[in-house]
Image (cartoon, rainbow, N blue to C red):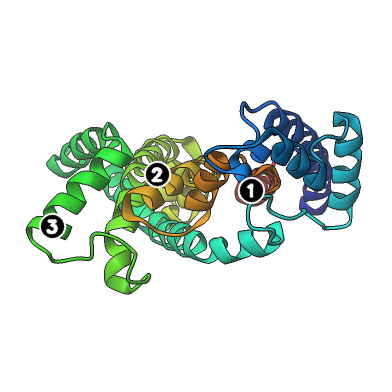
């Protein structure tokens, strides 16, 4: 099977997955406790006012009718409007997307070279002091939750030493990005680096690499792509994890991204915003895994 056919088949599966997720998202969001009309009515809601709000927002219509209208609008690229602000969901998501994209993009951009360099360095010196030190440090850091590490870094570098901004309220400057990106990097670098190390050790011990070394060929150029194939799959799962990690980091560092928008939407039971964000996360997950599968197929073609 060539790469084009493989990617087309995976894309078709991805479309079905996103469609299924869209249906589940609608039903799960609808089953959340609480009522957006009650939230909008204020601290002392009047039953008549609540009923009027529900009618204005269409919340009094049957579930099947609301799902049909939502699915029809979604098929035409309309994610609806916020129940709280009245702004289009697409506009809200795009406004919050930039900070999250900067955080996640910088994390992935730094994650790949750091993981490969550390993993290969440890593998080529298997059993050495460097290998043992990297393994010990990575195991220890991987066990630290993101929120705990974020609080420690803020307390030390943001408050006690005042070297870096403790929050992103002043804008996402280079200095303000250091702490949140560091928090997002630690666990993925540890896990991906260890995976690259393990895969590299296995590949170097394989017969074809030993034969290449006997012939005096550049065995490293042949070994590295095969060692990176499983790491690419892990990187896709890491990007999925980043979506959750970014929510925690944005909350700690007060960054107005998708995580903060999601938390606000849950608090106000803003159903259209919740549905839009959930679909964005689902589509991102499917797309990232599709790209990872295509890269893995290219690095290590299957029969």
- Identify residue for label 3: 159
- Identify residue for label 1: 277
Corner quadrant of residue 111: bottom left
Discs 1, 2 touching: Cβ within 8 Å: no
Q: Between residue 63 and residue 14, name the one nearer to us.
A: 63
Q: What element carries label 2?
A: helix
How crowded pointer 3 is (Cα within 10 Å; few <14, some 14-19, many 20+) is rated as some
How crowded pointer 2 is (Cα within 10 Å; few <14, some 14-19, many 20+) is rated as some
Residue at the left extreme, as displayed: 160
How far across and down, in percent of the image, does residue 282 sit? 67, 43
- Identify residue for label 2: 248
Q: Residue at x 34, y 65 (%)?
A: 169
Residue 235 seen anywhere in this rendered image of the structure = no
Q: In which quarter of the image is the C terminus?
A: top right
Corner quadrant of residue 167: bottom left
Of the image marks 1 and 3, the number of the one nearer the N terminus: 3
Discs 2, 3 touching: Cβ within 8 Å: no
Q: Is residue 277 left or right of residue 136?
A: right
Of the image marks 1 and 2, the number of the one nearer the N terminus: 2
Q: Residue at x 77, y 49 (%)?
A: 7
Q: How many marks?
A: 3
114 w.r.t. 98: above or below: above
């Amino acid at each position: 099977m060539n790469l084009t056919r493989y990617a087309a088949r995976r894309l078709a599966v991805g479309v079905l997955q996103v469609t299924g997720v869209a249906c589940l998202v609608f039903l799960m969001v609808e089953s959340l406790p609480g009522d957006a009309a009650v939230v909008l009515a204020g601290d002392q809601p009047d039953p008549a006012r609540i009923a009027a709000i529900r009618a204005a927002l269409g919340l009094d219509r049957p579930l099947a009718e609301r799902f049909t209208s939502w699915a029809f609008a979604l098929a035409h690229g309309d994610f609806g409007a916020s129940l709280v602000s009245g702004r289009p969901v697409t506009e809200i998501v795009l406004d919050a997307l930039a900070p999250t994209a900067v955080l996640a993009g910088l994390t992935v951009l730094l994650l790949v070279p750091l993981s490969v360099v550390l993993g290969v360095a440890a593998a080529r010196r298997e059993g050495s002091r460097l290998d043992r030190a990297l393994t010990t440090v990575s195991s220890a850091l991987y066990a630290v939750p993101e929120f705990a590490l974020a609080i420690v870094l803020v307390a030390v570098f943001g408050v006690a030493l005042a070297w870096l901004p403790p929050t992103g309220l002043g804008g996402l400057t280079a200095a303000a990005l250091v702490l949140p990106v560091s928090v997002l990097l630690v666990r993925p670098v540890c896990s991906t680096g260890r995976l690259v190390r393990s895969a590299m050790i296995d590949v170097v011990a394989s017969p074809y690499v030993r034969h290449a070394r006997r012939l005096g060929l550049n065995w490293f150029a042949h070994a590295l792509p095969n060692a990176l194939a499983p790491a690419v799959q892990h990187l896709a799962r890491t990007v999925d994890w980043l979506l959750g990690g970014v929510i925690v980091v944005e909350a700690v560092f007060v960054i107005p991204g998708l995580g903060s928008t999601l938390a606000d939407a849950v608090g106000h039971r803003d159903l259209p915003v919740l549905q839009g964000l959930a679909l964005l996360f689902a589509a991102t997950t499917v797309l990232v895994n599709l790209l990872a599968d295509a890269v893995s197929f290219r690095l290590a073609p299957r029969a």
